[in-house]
């Protein structure tokens, strides 16, 4: 739309470009922090996924939308009686601090439109409830006490209270932006008549409340989501309003406020929700996992991810240049579930020993390692070993820099012996037992720094998994899934000019059985693909396997791989349906 172009031009010609002059300074604490706490908490935390004794699917903070609860009923049943008498800001911040978290982001207003603080700008807020206190003020003070950066998640585009906001199509049946898709996904193209309403909502509620949060609490970071509910020009105006209220341009703003295509004009990028795998992303980025599978507290979703998941996820993100903003949903009474506290404490215990390999660390340019991931801080390379070698020999592939010394981070007196195998690889001799069964960290001081060999060294003694997230995408138009389990695939594969490849090395001849893991997008997607590795072609006819079912595996056959370098590729031959399969991995299995 012309309004989008006008606002972008205004931003690039003026205020936005000016705000980039101190971006490096603004982002310095964020890039150092690496690990933060994300909180979804509000009146929806009381029913916690149940409404009138009926379980509601999906995220519990979406209860009002999922159960299509009329606004007046939501007020009467949830907002007015909301009274989290056991809320203790110091206790919350202590949990975050004990987990090793360096920043804290909480819902000041979520999609239900209810402000969790006293808002004179738009008084649909905490003062309507029985809880006549300001939890945001208490948390802000506690964050300062613990030395934790503090900020807010504000739902700027999706609001189920305001009559002129997108989203609530049960109280306001003609409003776009809801599940009925009134006016379509990009409603502003079909419902130009509603633009005046959306502008009224933004000018009357979103901008005044966001600027109020800045004035009242002086946040370090502001976090947004669902920008697709508003046209781009209104999202840009909101960002401009933030910079107007923050003339020093010191507030970090995430990447889900004003984005278009593959671009955004926030300070960093956001990957998908609840990602377990990460695709390559340039610059600073952030992922937002949860302790369970909901962001708001849930009495239905009772399973917690193990501590091991997070102490591997965190360095995996760091190794690719990202931060982890880990979510927990406190209970409606203001307390945390003891299962969440246990997960936080477990992560904190690991970080207390190994934090130097995370805080202030950055991505490395080493190739993928079969045993784990690597992070880098200054001249120190950290090897995060998820799979401790049974023979005590760990090969670091592609390392052309020299190692000066090495030790176990968990025991700095435990020196690690090392030797160079060739110009590209080092062998470390490790103790028989891993210091930590989840993730043992080895520190290596590098001398005579050199650009690594980018070709991935497979472990010829073990099985190897070649994720499509780690492949080189060939051709135009391919994209990635969001990284959730069973969604860590390559998608939009529609022609034979698109394919995936991995450049590999082996230090010895080896034989593998090849498997292909995949699922499909359309219910009728079938076809034929070809895996070629070291000149050996394996053809696979695949059937429909919707991602909702998980991941399907095809056994393709055996290959003999030579010592030295070779290429593995995954190419399409023919398909029926919406596109080729969505491939997840090629596996080289020792059988």
Image (cartoon, helix red, strand yellow):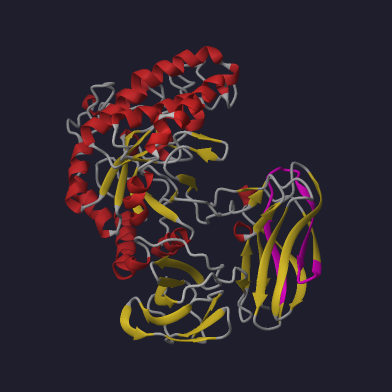
Q: Quadrant of residue 239?
A: top left
Asked if 160 appears above or below 99 in the picture, the reply is above
The residue at the point 30 percent across, 50 percent down is 103
The residue at the point 54 percent across, 52 percent down is 483
The residue at the point 47 percent across, 23 percent down is 166
Image quarter where the N terminus lies is: top right
The segment highlighted magenta reads 512-537
Magenta-drawn stretch contains 523: yes
Using the rendered image of the protein, determine whether residue 410 is visible from the camera's viewpoint.
yes
Asked if 191 appears above or below 251 in the picture, the reply is above
Asked if 158 appears above or below 347 in the picture, the reply is above
Left-right relation of 538 to 549: right
Q: Compare residues 168 and 366 and report the one nearer the observer.
A: 366
Image quarter where the C terminus lies is: bottom right
Left-right relation of 457 to 332: right
Magenta-drawn stretch contains 368: no
Q: Quadrant of residue 550?
A: bottom right
Using the rendered image of the protein, determine whether residue 163 is visible from the camera's viewpoint.
no
Left-right relation of 224 to 390: left
Residue 428 rendering spot, x and y as whole percentages: 48, 84
Residue 256 rendering spot, x and y as whole percentages: 45, 38
The chief SS type of the magenta part is strand
Q: Compare residues 185 and 188 and report the one nearer the observer.
A: 188
Q: How many marks?
A: 0
Residue 485 rendering spot, x and y as whole percentages: 55, 54
Q: Compare residues 399 and 358 and report the one nearer the observer.
A: 399
Residue 240 rendering spot, x and y as whole percentages: 38, 28
């Amino acid at each position: 739309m012309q309004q989008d172009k006008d606002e972008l031009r205004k931003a690039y010609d003026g205020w936005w470009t000016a705000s980039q002059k101190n971006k490096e300074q603004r982002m310095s604490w964020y890039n150092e922090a690496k690990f933060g706490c994300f909180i979804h908490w509000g009146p929806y935390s009381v029913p916690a996924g149940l409404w009138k004794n009926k379980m509601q699917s999906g995220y519990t903070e979406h209860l009002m939308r999922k159960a299509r609860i009329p606004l007046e009923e939501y007020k009467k049943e949830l907002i007015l009686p909301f009274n989290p008498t056991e809320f203790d800001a110091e206790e919350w911040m202590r949990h975050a601090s004990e987990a090793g978290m360096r920043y804290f982001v909480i819902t000041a207003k979520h999609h239900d439109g209810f402000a969790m603080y006293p808002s004179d700008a738009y008084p649909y807020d905490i003062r309507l409830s029985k809880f006549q206190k300001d939890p945001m003020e208490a948390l802000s003070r506690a964050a300062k006490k613990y030395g934790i950066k503090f900020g807010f998640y504000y739902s700027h585009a999706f609001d189920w209270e305001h009559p002129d906001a997108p989203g609530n199509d049960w109280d306001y049946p003609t409003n776009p932006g809801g599940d009925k898709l009134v006016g379509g996904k990009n409603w502003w193209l079909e419902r130009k008549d509603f633009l005046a309403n959306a502008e009224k909502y933004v000018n009357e509620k979103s901008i005044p409340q966001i600027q109020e949060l800045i004035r009242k609490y002086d946040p370090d970071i502001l976090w947004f989501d669902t920008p697709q509910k508003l046209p781009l020009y209104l999202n840009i105006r909101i960002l401009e309003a933030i910079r107007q209220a923050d003339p020093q341009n010191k507030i970090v703003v995430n990447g889900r406020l004003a984005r278009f295509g593959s671009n955004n004009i926030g300070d960093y990028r956001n990957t998908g929700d609840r990602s377990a795998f990460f695709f390559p992303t340039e610059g600073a980025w952030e992922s937002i996992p949860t302790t369970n599978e909901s962001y708001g507290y849930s009495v239905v979703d009772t399973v917690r991810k193990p501590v091991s998941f997070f102490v591997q996820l965190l360095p995996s993100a760091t190794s690719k240049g990202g931060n982890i903003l880990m979510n927990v949903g406190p209970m409606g009474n203001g307390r945390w579930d003891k299962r969440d506290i246990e997960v936080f404490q477990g992560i904190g215990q690991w970080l207390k020993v190994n934090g130097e390999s995370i805080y202030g660390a950055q991505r490395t340019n080493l190739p993928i390692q079969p045993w784990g991931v690597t992070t880098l801080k200054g001249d120190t390379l950290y090897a995060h070993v998820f799979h401790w070698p049974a023979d005590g020999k760990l090969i670091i592939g592609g390392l052309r820099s020299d190692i000066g010394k090495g030790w176990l981070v968990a025991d700095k007196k435990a020196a690690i012996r090392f030797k160079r195998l060739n110009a590209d690889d080092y062998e470390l001799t490790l103790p028989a037992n891993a210091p930590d069964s989840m993730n043992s960290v080895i520190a290596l001081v590098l001398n005579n720094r050199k650009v690594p060999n980018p070709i991935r060294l497979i472990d010829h003694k073990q099985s190897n998994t070649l994720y499509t997230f780690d492949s080189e995408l060939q051709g135009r138009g391919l994209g990635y899934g969001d990284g959730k389990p069973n969604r860590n695939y390559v998608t939009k594969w529609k022609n034979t000019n698109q394919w995936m490849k991995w450049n590999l090395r082996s230090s010895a001849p080896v034989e593998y059985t090849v498997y292909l893991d995949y699922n499909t997008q359309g219910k009728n997607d079938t076809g034929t693909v070809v895996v070629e590795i070291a000149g050996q072609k394996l053809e696979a006819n695949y059937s429909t396997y919707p991602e909702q079912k998980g991941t399907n595996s095809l056994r393709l056959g055996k290959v003999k791989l030579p010592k030295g370098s070779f290429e593995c590729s995954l190419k399409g031959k023919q398909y029926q349906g919406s596109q080729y399969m969505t491939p997840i991995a090629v596996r080289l299995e020792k059988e």
